[in-house]
Every structure is written in structure tokens, then in C-alpha cells.
Image (cartoon, grey):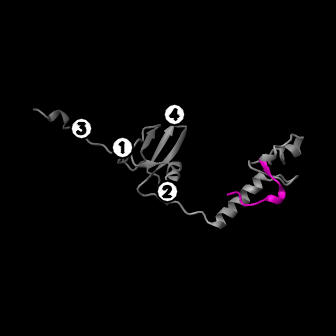
Amino acid sequence: MPGREHEDLVDVDLTDPGDGSIPVFRWKQAGRTGLATRRQLRDMGLRPGGQEPAARIECRGGQRFAWLYRIDLAKPKFAMTFAKEAALDKAMAARQTCGTCGRRYFHCIPLKTLGSCLECHDGTPADPTSYIAPAEHRLAA
């Protein structure tokens, strides 16, 4: 009978395995499924917004993975307030300021391993354009 050869075929939704488990995609297989990682959501100005992961994407033979979230359920990112900006600046200042000379660098200095900037540790001269003098501290953003 014509047409009976396709009777056993079933249309399958890749985003819903049916058994309650989370679907797993391999690297670059998620395609246009309406799912995104946290970083991809952030680049779109969104956040997961409390939703559970809808899927998982794996690479390196399953050794590395990222959760995928539904874009249609994502919410807008929270706006940066002055209080949040000040708190972030204070945290970054702790990582960027040398305790010996008081200079604040534009990069994090190795406080755990060396305890100070390179100039204070071993005399390696610092580029004057790579730090802010102690009297010039201000918000980084």
C-alpha cells in the first residue's frame, strides 16, 4: 500500500525528551532551538530570571558543559545602580591596589602570591600609564 512505509515514523521534539530528563546537545547542535547560555542571554540584555535550565550543551566529550535557558522566559537584566557600582569599585580596588605603595593599577595585581605590585616586590619599574596615583582614586566605571 502506498504511504504505509512512513506510518511508523514519529515527529520528535528535541527539546523535550519525554521522560522528564533534560535534553543534552553536543557542541554546536543546539542551533536555533530558542535556547541560550547565560553569557548569550547577558549579551542580549537578559537574565534567566529564576527559570530552571531547559537543556544542557556539552563539549570535549562531556567534560565541559553549559546550561541552556529558554529565551522566551528570560527577563531583562537589572539596571546598575550607583550603590552597586560603588560596591563593585570597592571590591576591584582591593584587588588592584598595592598595599605597599598605594598605587591602584588598571589590572589585578598578584596580592596572594607576591603581596604587592612588581615594583615593590622586586624593583621592576611600572609603566606610569598602568596605574593611578593614590590621590587620584575615583570610581572606575
Name the spot of residue 100 as percent of width and height, x first. Answer: 88, 52
What is the distance, in whole Å, between disc 2 and disc 1 at their CAs?
Answer: 21 Å
* Residue 48 disc label: 2
Name the spot of residue 40 as percent of width and height, x first. Answer: 50, 48
Q: Are marks 1 and 4 in contact (CB under 8 Å)?
A: no
Q: Where is mark 1, residue-wise?
A: 14
Label 3 packing within 10 angstroms: few (<14), some (14-19), many (20+): few
Question: Of marks 2 and 1, which one's residue comes earlier in the chain?
Answer: 1
Give the side of residue 91 with respect to residue 20, left or right.
right
Q: Magenta part of the protein: which range? A: 130-141
Label 2 packing within 10 angstroms: few (<14), some (14-19), many (20+): many
Name the spot of residue 106 as percent of width and height, x first. Answer: 74, 49
Quarter placement of the N terminus: top left
Q: Is residue 79 visible?
A: yes
Q: Where is mark 4, residue-wise?
A: 61
Q: Is residue 109 visible?
A: no
Question: Of marks 3 and 1, which one's residue comes earlier in the chain?
Answer: 3
Question: Of marks 2 and 3, which one's residue comes earlier in the chain?
Answer: 3
In the image, residue 84 sits, relative to residue 124, either above or below, namely: below
What is the distance, in whole Å, between disc 4 and disc 3 at their CAs?
Answer: 30 Å
Question: Of marks 4 and 3, which one's residue comes earlier in the chain?
Answer: 3
What is the distance, in whole Å, between disc 3 and disc 1 at their CAs?
Answer: 15 Å
